[in-house]
Image: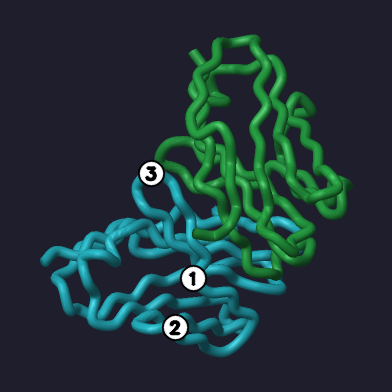
Chain colours: A cyan, B green
Amino acid sequence: KNEVEQSPQNLTAQEGEFITINCSYSVGISALHWLQQHPGGGIVSLFMLSSGKKKHGRLIATINIQEKHSSLHITASHPRDSAVYICAVCPNYQLIWGAGTKLIIKP
Amino acid sequence: ETGVTQSPTHLIKTRGQQVTLRCSSQSGHNTVSWYQQALGQGPQFIFQYYREEENGRGNFPPRFSGLQFPNYSSELNVNALELDDSALYLCASSRTSGGADTQYFGPGTRLTVL
């Protein structure tokens, strides 16, 4: 069993829809990261969470430490949000990465 | 733009050769982490350097080695290249060691081993 599980693996939605991507992990962590990877490889850090909730623009990330679960939400989705979204957890000095969720937003 | 640069962008090598990849960290960052991302998979942690010392290592053989310089830029060296080393190599810099700090990623170096 992977230490970090993401769901869904693939998600296709229409522009404007509310998007939720889930991440569950099985190890104790000091922080959880949500990252975005566009075709071609560039990775951008979206959020780093250790508790509660963070919001940046149309993106919201939440974490429940007791349940070892985090969600990434995108409101009013747009085709430019199409990318792979990756959850990564930090139990010590390294990041353990989920397999990613490939999101496609159709106009 | 994260301020983290990597060179070269692309590289083609043959089995058995050696390669050096370079990463310049963002200003003010003293930690660089290296990751290998095979096609269609998530990144795998190779190692982390903090203030010129290796601070942690993933499950990679000793032919993967690194350096960090006084200006906190870093190199990843891979000896005796194998076909499975073909991947995107990403570096990330951060203000502190460990992974509990925002990571700023470079654009990556795509290595192809023939």
Chain of the residue on which disc 2 is drawn:
A
Q: Can you say whether B5 is above or below B61 in the image?
A: below
**Separation of marks 3 and 1 at Cα, in angstroms:** 18 Å
Residue name at image x 63 percent, y 53 percent: B92
**Percent x, y for residue B76?**
70, 34
Question: Are the residues at dot 2 and dot 1 in contact (C-beta closer than 8 Å)?
Answer: yes
Which residue bears the numbered disc 3? A40
Q: Secondary structure at mark 3?
A: loop
Residue A51, by quadrant, is bottom right
What amino acid is labelled 3 in the image?
Gly
Which residue bears the numbered disc 2? A56
**Percent x, y for residue B87?**
51, 32
Q: Can you say whether B13 is above or below B105 in the image?
A: above
* Residue at the extreme bottom: A52
Instruction: Assess disc 3: are there few (<14), some (14-19) or many (≥20) residues with their C-alpha within 10 Å of its C-alpha.
Output: few
Instruction: Assess disc 2: are there few (<14), some (14-19) or many (≥20) residues with their C-alpha within 10 Å of its C-alpha.
Output: few
What amino acid is labelled 1 in the image?
Leu
Residue name at image x 58 percent, y 41 percent: B6
Tell which circle, 3 or 2, labels the residue nearer the N-terminal end: 3
Residue name at image x 29 percent, y 76 percent: A19
Q: In front here: B32 or A4?
A: B32
Tell which circle, 2 or 1, labels the residue nearer the N-terminal end: 1
